Amino acid sequence: MNGLDVTSEPFIRLSVFILLLTILALLEFFSPRRQSHYPKSKRWLNNFGISILNTIVVALIIPVVGTGAALLASEMNWGLFNWLNIWPLIGIPLYILAFDLTIYLQHRLFHRFKPLWRLHRMHHTDLDYDVSTGVRFHPLSILFSAVIKLSLILILGPPGIAVLIAEIVLNGTSMFNHSNIKLPTKLDAALRYFIVTPDMHRIHHSIEAEEHSRNFGFNFPWWDKLFHTYKDQPSKEQAAIDLGIRGYHEEDSIGLFSLLTQPFRKDRETH
Ligand SMILES: [Zn+2]
Ligand SMILES: [Zn+2]
């Protein structure tokens, strides 16, 4: 499959994850953007615990995801790229772009429809904001997302390597833009031309409704600018933004059990 062995995907993804986690955690320690208010060890245990659970759930329920699906599409001659015989050098960036737009639209769906919002809300009820927030998603929202990604792969039939790159980039940028690191203002402004920065995405985690309906992008910042959902700066200073969802406090936002059952419990939102 375009020189890529499907069995190497988990190894490559895990290696990049550990490397990035180490770098970002060190930067958070030495140059934090904001002070943490809640016990980090407990939050990390739960946020990373959920991430491990998500990996297991997806592997068990949808075994053919990622590069495996691209291989299947290529063998069966499914998908636009295979029908049009798109050259991989064009197919790779084209797929990464289409994938990122899909993730942006999916994120807007998660906010737009109540049942999906209940699944996504758990990501927003984290009361601090750091690299672990970037992997904190409800398993059912990950399953929903896996079905969308699988559909995109089967519709487009991209090269396997494009699927692997897109997944690694998404995981990496999600960890980066949730990290509690302080970037120089000029660097943040320069990066924002092509990547969502922590200061940009943090606005999306604000408790204020007007702010949390902005900056849906995960990787490229262009979709927010194109669809007029971009907000450059928060109304308060970055260090003073109140994070979370009104009505959700520590007891609803940290324990693993509370996080998993949160979508099915009575709404506590107060606007
Ligand atoms: Zn969101
Ligand atoms: Zn987020």
Image (spheres, helix red, strand yellow):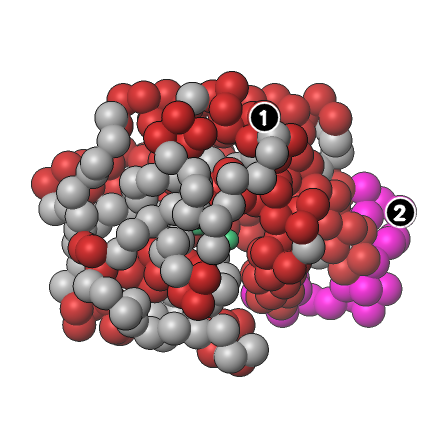
Against 54, residue 184 (above or below) is below
The answer to whether the residue bearing label 1 lies less than 8 angstroms from the nearest atom of ligand 1 is: no
Q: Is residue 77 left or right of residue 206?
A: right
On whether residue 19 falls in the magenta region, the answer is: no
Q: Residues within 10 Å of mark 1 (few under 14, many from 20)?
A: few
Q: Which residue is mark 2?
A: 76
Give how far across and how far down residue 80 sits, in percent.
81, 64
Residue at point 35%, 61% (across, down):
203
Q: Which residues are magenta?
A: 72-93
Give how far across and how far down residue 163 sits, in percent.
62, 49
- Check whether the beta carbons of the residues at disc 1 and disc 2 lie within 8 A of each other: no
Task: Answer yes or no: is residue 168 visible.
Answer: no
Residue at point 68%, 55% (across, down):
113
* Three-letter amino acid code at the position of disc 2: Met
| Residue nearer the viewer, 110 or 182 | 110
Q: Earlier in the sequence, mark 1 or mark 2?
A: 2
* Three-letter amino acid code at the position of disc 1: Thr
Give how far across and how far down residue 241 sits, in percent.
26, 56
Q: Which residue is mark 1?
A: 261
Q: Secondary structure at mark 1?
A: helix
